[in-house]
Image (cartoon, helix red, strand yellow):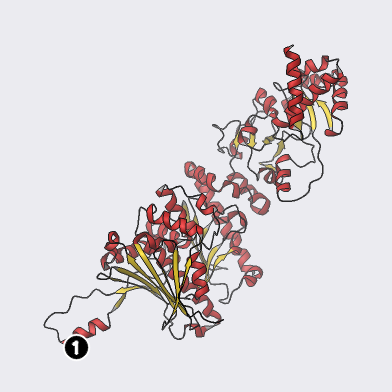
Amino acid sequence: MAVETKKETLGFQTEVKQLLHLMIHSLYSNREIFLRELISNASDAADKLRYLALKSSELLESDPNLEVRVDYDKDANTVTIADNGIGMNRDDVITHLGTIAKSGTSDFLKTLTGDQKKDSQLIGQFGVGFYSAFIVADKVTVETRKVDTEEAVRWVSDGSGEFTVEPITKDKRGTTIILHLKPEAEEYADGWRLRNIIRKYSDHISMPILMRKEEMPATEEEDKEEKEEKDKAPEWETVNTAKALWTRSRSDITDEEYNEFYKHISHDHTDPLKWSHNRVEGKLEYNSLLYIPAKAPFDLYNRDMQKGLKLYVQRVFIMDQAEEFLPMYLRFIKGVVDSNDLSLNVSREILQKDPAVDSMKTALTKRVLDMLEKLARKEPEQYASFWKEFGQVLKEGPAEDYANRERIAKLLRFSSTESQGLEQDQSLEGYVSRMKEGQDKIYYITAETPKAAANSPHLEVFRKKGLEVLLLSDRVDEWLMSHLFEFDGKSFVDIGRGDLDLGKLDSEEEKQAQEEAAKEHEDLVKRISDVLGADVESVRVTHRLTDSPACLVVGQNDMGMQMRRIMEAAGQSMPESKPIFEINPEHPLIGRLDKEVDEDRFADLTRVVFDQASLAAGGQLDDPAAYVQRLNKLLLEMAV
């Protein structure tokens, strides 16, 4: 491909323009964060080159010592961050610096509110740390040359909406970022200030971060040659410890260091909720450092999101998103795994076939579940916070991880008729501990919304008997329950599906009364069946209801309404399903229906009661206008 030979002015992607405006004017109460972000990007560039060099060692021959250099110029009011990593070509520069590469959608901006604290937490989750440079700079210059090429490019922008790209000559590979500081940010053109920021945020970076050694100015007594030597060849010194955090002893690492390392690998700006740091020795040898984030990323529910742990082999970086070490339902976990038992030329194909990976995955999954169990047991308020962020993803676990199904089930939280409001705050262990004498099943109801579940007519007989029911309304819930068959030896029962058998919870008198009611109203059931015809599977007298006139019941082997809608939204055609219509003969409206002799009025009233039951079940009417006409007709007749 021919190298561009002219300077060109291009416009930022629309989302970037909005983001830059937001950053420059309202984001980041802690402005010094810009240095951490740019150093982290430089570290990533070095890691990528180190990985390429595993197969092509010649890439490092001319400049083998990977490093980051931070410099400043008080007179020019600039700060410079330079690395000798993988570098970029012209296309890379436009792609990475002109667009929000990881999100690329306007959905990103929809999540930003202008609230400083909240927005600053979001930035890292979208992979846009580079733009933090504009918090302190009114102009940013990037000069870069990609490894193994002669092509070099300069990118310049003041953050106002456009940037220029032009070819340049650059002696070595890597990237140099020059920040032309705003007048109010001149404090950062200072060696002491920069050193302190690096030690605070980037001490854990596993490659050296160098700064010019602070020298005393030359004295009059020093000869001219010595003065010139100091000016020409300043000494550089390493500012950070440059030792991989996960290889150090836990007792030597502070909470602040753990928090900052999490922010480095996740590009998040909030502290993690919890972490687990372990060294495993024996048949397998590896270090792991796993983090539970405090906040969910924007794309958590996209199963194609970038996920996985940072993989190192014998302290050599291999890949950023090694998905094979944790199951999909734990995709929110961030961290590092460093193994001595994988080959350095490891690839994704090898990872998928290596039995050591399976063993490590089993152990790391157990480690995460241990963390969550401990959090739920010892810090229930913190666990409640975790559940609000990641609960729906954890609900995918029982279907994906059969071996840990019982452990995952203990971590699940649901809203129930015992909840305070509609919060998902009840565990299955708590439910079982409150079960009535003679109760051997765990009852639940699914609905489209929490309020619809809490107000379902199916709950009426359970409230009458004081039986707790789980209220499920998340999109994943019906799918979850199709894989969660029992807990603590108690089977799950959907109270809106099939026949309702309360077993010992119904007395013999109640069972006899139910049978007598069914026989007594056989004629009414047949009349209603004749009206509804093919719209229902059957009509029967209910013993679920105490206050409502009727309800719809899903057939025992039919797919529920919630799952049906999900499948239809995904473009799958679903087989026809007909509900069971149950009537409550004790309700005055059904009593009125039983006495109706006018067949047209009987049909209208039957249809109205059926449509109302459909609405109460969260369904949609095929012909809303017909329902309104029937209802208006009946109301007018009543008014006469």
Please indicate whether residue 228 sits to the left or right of residue 579 in the image: left
Q: Tell me if 507 is positioned left or right of 318 in this view.
A: right
Q: Is residue 450 left or right of residue 272?
A: right
Give the crowd class for mark 1: few <14, some 14-19, many >=20 residues within 10 Å. Answer: few
- Is residue 315 in view from this perspective? no
Q: Could you say where residue 198 lies in the image, as x and y percent from the top left?
A: 34, 65
Q: Position of residue 88 (x, y in %)?
A: 48, 75
Quadrant of the rendered image containing residue 2:
bottom right
The residue depicted at 79 percent of the width and 32 percent of the height is: 499
Q: Is residue 221 above or below residue 384?
A: below
Closer to the camera in the image, 575 or 141 = 141
Q: Residue furthest left?
A: 221
> Which residue, given by chain and number where applicable, does mark 1 sit on?
225
Task: Look at the numbered disc 1 and give the secondary structure of its residue.
Answer: helix
Report the label total: 1
Q: Position of residue 57 (x, y in %)?
A: 51, 84
Give the residue displayed 76% in from the left and 15% down from the top.
Answer: 637
Please state, as top left, top right, bottom left or bottom right, where the C terminus lies in the image: top right
Q: Amino acid at mark 1?
A: Glu
- Residue 41, given in percent of the width and then of the height, sits at 44, 67
Looking at the rendering, which quadrant does residue 562 occupy?
A: top right
Quarter of the image with the N terminus in it: bottom right
Q: Nearer the viewer, residue 551 or 173?
A: 173
> Is residue 442 shown to the viewer in this render?
yes
Residue at 64% across / 33% down in the picture? 452
Give the residue furthest to the bottom.
225
Q: Is residue 336 above or below residue 555?
A: below
Residue lying farthest top? Answer: 640
